[in-house]
Image (tube, rainbow, N blue to C red):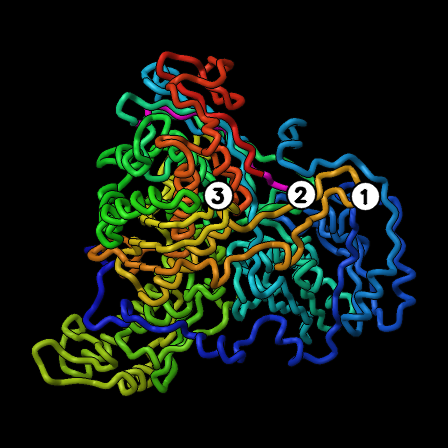
Amino acid sequence: MSHLSERPEKPVVGVPMPHESAALHVTGTALYTDDLVYRTKDVLHAYPVQVMKAHGRITALRTEPALAVPGVVRVLTGADVPGVNDAGMKHDEPLFPDEVMFHGHAVAWVLGETLEAARLGAAAVEVELDELPSLVTLQDAIEQESFHGARPLMVTGDVHSGFADSAHVFTGEFQFSDQEHFYLETHAALALIDENEQVFIQSSSQHPSETQEIVAHVLGLHSHEVTVQCLRMGGGFGGKEMQPHGFAAVAALGAKLTGRPVRLRLNRTQDLTMSGKRHGFNATWKIGFDADGRIRALDATLTADGGWSLDLSEPVLARALCHIDNTYWIPNAHIAGRIAKTHKVSNTAFRGFGGPQGMLVIEDILGRCAPQLGLDPMELRERNFYQQGQTTPYGQPVTQSERISAVWEKVKENGGVADRRREIAAFNAAHPHTKRALALTGVKFGISFNLTAFNQGGALVLIYKDGSVLINHGGTEMGQGLHTKMLQVAATTLGIPLQKVRLAPTRTDKVPNTSATAASSGADLNGGAVKNACEQLRERLLQVAGTQLGANASDVRIVDGVARTLGSDKELAWDDLVRTAYFQRVQLSAAGFYRTEGLHWDAKSFTGSPFKYFAIGAAAAEVEVDGFTGAYRIRRVDIVHDVGDSLSPMIDIGQVEGGFVQGAGWLTLEDMRWDAGDGPNRGRLLTQAASTYKLPSFSEMPEEFNVTLLENATEEGAVYGSKAVGEPPLMLAFSVREALRQAAAAFGPSGVGVELASPATPEAVYWAIQAARQDDVSQDGHATDGHAPDDGHAGNGHAAIGEVRTDVTALNGA
């Protein structure tokens, strides 16, 4: 076993324990960024001047009326920026724009003594606009060929010969929705200037180092003149990886210009209308199967709705391409990607970071094609699982491919799938107006940032004379339990009880140049760094203990806060050991560092091994659907998920449950709507509140919800044998959507297949039921349309005709 993954005697990791701030969360005593306003003197409040048009050039911006409003102190505009007027890493996001690019774009910010004064001041600012044409829908952008950023292409094998060797060929189109993060805490920042003119910012940010960098270049400062701290976040889900930087920069600019602290917090409507979402996608595809239902070739084009600027759209698209295979071997593939430029908010990271979008495409294809192939969907999926020795379309060997089948079979066993499917068949035969279905889907998700440089982490660990320990690391806590795991890692490595260790808030002046807490890599990177720092300290202390105990340092072990010599009853308490080390002038602080080894990636050729390992999981979901309304309920969910040797089982099970529910929300409930008409509100987000945007709640939870972590699953080369858990469980929710598809199909003749929009709202399910009842899909084994491209590339949703070739017609799921 590798040094990194090996666990010592009596480890604190692996012990089930609650979140380190759980009691603070439920009692309301946990502090968040905006809570600090009430502990800060003379705070000014920032309020945006939003322009409610989708696209236009500013011809006049008059701020004088705002200054006449009582309580208004200043109006911030582009003329006030001493550095670079840009809030993005791609330099395509003006902080104060002269061109409005989406409905609700902020063009100036008003600072007031009170929030109400700032609001009234913002309303008084006069903006004149020369309106310009706008592209609101993804389809509009595709038709107008409005694209920006990279256009990656992933190729493996020979897709032409793959289709020539296929017994069945299908084509189709699939468009699916974006998703709002809807974290509990909206974007917030509090900036102040100290007596040395240093800028200090409290920010609800998943990436404090990048917030620091953006603020510094907006203010024309060096990074060492800016400190960013993140206490904790009330949720992030990727929405606070890039998007907080501009808000922090506005607050910092206001503080710099006025000399007073500035608070910026978006209300819910502002947050919804000004911040980015999960990327909606359009996919056109063509797939070939052999006579046994094994994939021979896939040709697809994935188009992401990037919004008005690039933000993280390029890496999101890259990860979507890298995950279109999911758990299935595709020997011949030609997958193209592109980013649509639309006049909407700039879409950004969201749990899964493009992985869910890529995987949804292949799962939708298999769900649609299984009836056409005369195969049970579960059987079709099993036949295409990766086997030992096979590689992904981008060239990375799929290690632990046996775990794909292992979790799958374990779910079938735990969930009594075979017996329940027989019961479901009997139920459906007896109930003409209500149908049930059970679907099983798997997940293979790559862990690491696609950009190799981001796969590093840092930590600073301090031991005080009294034996207490303080850890600092570069990861941020958004409720996911990272801090809890880091406390357990530190206590385990040092060999001391958990209560000896405390964790400090994440700050850029303690650990520099950190990566975002994203890509499910928080525990891997920061855990490796914390472990490294603690190992340095432990080695120094073992030398001291060896001298005190009259033994070689290599024969000393520190367990439960006591140093003992092997084969002897001599011992030395931790507090005494630390005190002795101090008087011997032994350094009691250490900076730790970790870099993920074995990664390489060529973005141009789209080949390499970008991931340290794959997280594996499987879920079986049973649903019941009402034939009159399309309404449904999730009767039962069984999950088996691979987290390696869990660092903190309660935390990990909570992450699996939460990720699954969030994924089910994206796929079945969360229906974002934009005004695409030609009226005065074109481009406006219509679903601006929880009253119009349906979020998963207790009523959508599975009636029976069973989550099991895969046993005996040590991950070599990862901290204490664990695996990442944040993002992969979200994709387990594919099982719910596929179960809904099968339940809708059950209202039609045996073997009928249906198309299903995403999100699969009750309305969408109802229309799928109607299609099944009418048996619109041809059952005779021939194509329903004979027009198709013959160049081997994905076309417009029509299949090439062949003796046994079949067509799956296009579906626009928007």
How far apart are the two marked residues, 1 and 3, measured between alpha carbons? 33 Å
Residue 303 is covered by the magenta coloring: yes
In the rendered image, which quarter contains the N terminus? bottom left
In this view, the residue in front, 698 or 747, is: 747
- What residue span does the magenta drawing correspond to? 294-308
Tags 2 and 3 in contact by the CB under 8 Å rule? Answer: no
In this view, the residue in front, 369 or 192, is: 369
Q: In this view, does 805 lie above or below 9?
A: above
Circle 2 sits on which residue? 92
Q: Which residue lies furthest to the left in this view?
A: 567
In this view, the residue in front, 648 or 424, is: 424
Residue type indicated by callout 1 = Pro
Residue type indicated by callout 2 = Asp
Circle 3 sits on which residue? 354
Using a 10 Å C-alpha cutoff, classify the residue at mark 1 as few (fewer than 14 neighbours), some (14 to 19) or many (20 or more).
few
- Magenta span: helix, strand or loop, mainly? strand
Which of marks 2 and 1 precedes in the sequence? Answer: 2
Q: Residue at x 26, y 48 (%)?
A: 417
How far apart are the two marked residues, 2 and 3, measured between alpha carbons? 21 Å
Which of marks 3 and 2 precedes in the sequence? Answer: 2
Question: Residue 35: x, y in percent?
Answer: 62, 75
Instruction: Specify the label residue 680 is tagged with.
Output: 1
Question: Residue 569: x, y in percent?
Answer: 10, 84
Looking at the rendered structure, the secondary structure element under dot 3 is: loop
Residue type indicated by callout 3 = Gly
